Image (cartoon, rainbow, N blue to C red):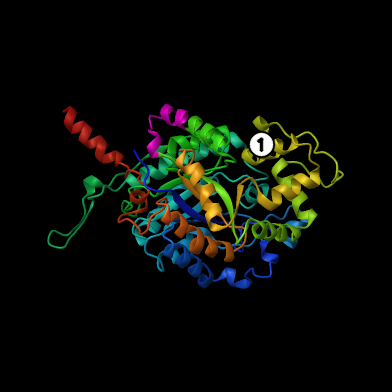
Amino acid sequence: MARRHMILSAFFFNPQGDHRMSWRHPRAPFAEIFGLDYYRRLAESAERAKLDAIFVADHVAIWDSVESGVAHYANARLEPLTLLTALSAVTKHIGLIATASSSYYEPYNLARLFASLDHVSNGRAAWNVVTSAMDEEALNFGRDGNIEHGFRYARAGEFLDIATALWDSWEDDAVLIDKETGYFADPDRVHRVDHTGQHFRVRGPLNVPRPPQGHPLIVQAGSSEAGKNLATRYADVHFAIIRSNEDGLRYRADINARLKKFGREPESFKILPGILPIVASSADEATEKQAFLDTLLPDRVAIDLLSSWAGLDLSAYPPDGPLPALPDESTFNGGRTSLNRVKDWTEQNLSIREIARKLANTGSVHPVTGTPSQIADQLEAWFVTGAVDGYNLMFPLLPEDWVNFAEQVVPELQRRGLFRQEYEPGTLRDRLGLPRPANRFATARDTHRAAS
């Protein structure tokens, strides 16, 4: 199936931008990041540019196991489902992707929240499924430390089975609101899920009718073996880490092989790598912008962050010396994608300080810098080969880089026929070319009738 145009999702984790110290920038916002108007203006800018979605990342803890986490790092942020529900009232078209943890919610609560967001937004909700990899998160939910990696992903799979069953627990035509007969709903089309599994026991049905999209979109970002398997079994959209066109084509081939094992077609799954776009009047100016942000980063924050990614306390090691031996991935309970990125950097013979600063300044995503035309060239190159379906746009400085991209790069992509001029009708699923899931209970009844 031919792809119509690239998918563009505007992402943020830190409210002032996705450089970890962007809050120090002279043009960064202040306390308005805790009010609705700031996000409303971002959403309006993205919707004017016809972007596909706003993607809000999240942790359910403050990163405070190290002093620099509270002292210097912008930890505080609004809860995504609350924020995006408010933004659904001041937008009409743009998708709304909220991060929520399968480790620290219950399936019924979360299925209800996302079904509600899908209804109030007229079919624009998406759930970024995370399993949570921080000890600080575990300590907020009655545990002594992070949950074992395999356990988290097993729980996530069962969680998704239940959530999708709950969204199906009302068939599409179950709501009658028939004032003459007195029937609000058809009881034959409202179903208990009666799930009993390793991690959960859930009766159902949901007390929200089936969402407009059937199921809100499922987004997943883990690139470990367990993460990729979870994604290709359940997800519609995959937030990937890709650093070159060749890397993207290899990743696509791997993903397609996994999709086949689950009986899925490649067209049912969209790959969006994260990129860091910096728009400027010249390549030199873009480099200067990036370099200025880098000057705002204390070494202490960088090394503490590297310690978190590597699962080791590096504060006792010489910062200009090499990294010590890293944990084995198979026994690591933190973020394995992050650990593997650190391992890649160790092969470049960099010091702890150098690796820490690379990590903190760009993370693991690919920077895309230059003039609007130069950035469009880079985005076009990966898209036309089929390596990617679009991009998760992680702007270093908000609102500046977000607005510059919307007002300068998007028109260039539109001019090239790579991006929409207007929103297509329908839900977020419709616009991304993703099918509406069949209702499992209606399908089972129809199959039973056909067999009898």
Q: Position of residue 286 (x, y in %)?
A: 64, 58
Is residue 85 rendered to the left or right of residue 187? Answer: right
427 to 226, vertically: above or below:
below
Q: Within the magenta stretch, is there residue 259?
A: yes
Q: Is residue 442 magenta?
A: no
The C terminus is located in which quarter? top left
Residue at 53% from the left image edge and 34% from the top image edge: 251
Residue under pointer 1: 340
Q: Main secondary structure of the magenta part?
A: helix
For the residue marked with disc 1, what is the amino acid? Asn
The residue positioned 81% from the left and 42% from the top of the image is 351
- Identify the element where label 1 is drawn: helix
Residue depicted at 46% across the width and 50% down the height: 127
Q: Position of residue 192 (x, y in %)?
A: 32, 44
* Quadrant position of residue 76: bottom right
Residue 234 placement (x, y as % from top left): 43, 38
Q: Hey, which quadrant is residue 181 in on the image?
A: bottom left
Image: 154 above or below 303: above
Asked whether 31 or 188 is in front, the reply is 31
Question: How many residues crowd mark 1 within 10 Å: few (<14), some (14–19), many (20+)?
Answer: some
- Please report the residue visible at 64 percent of the width from the left and 68 percent of the height from the top: 28
Q: Is residue 238 visible?
A: no
Does 228 sit left or right of 205 as displayed? right
Q: Which residues are magenta?
A: 256-268
**Residue 291 seen in the current view:** yes
Q: Judge left or right: residue 91 versus residue 443.
A: right
Give how far across and how far down residue 431 sits, in percent. 35, 51
Quarter containing the N terminus: top left
| Near-viewer residue (44 or 197) | 44
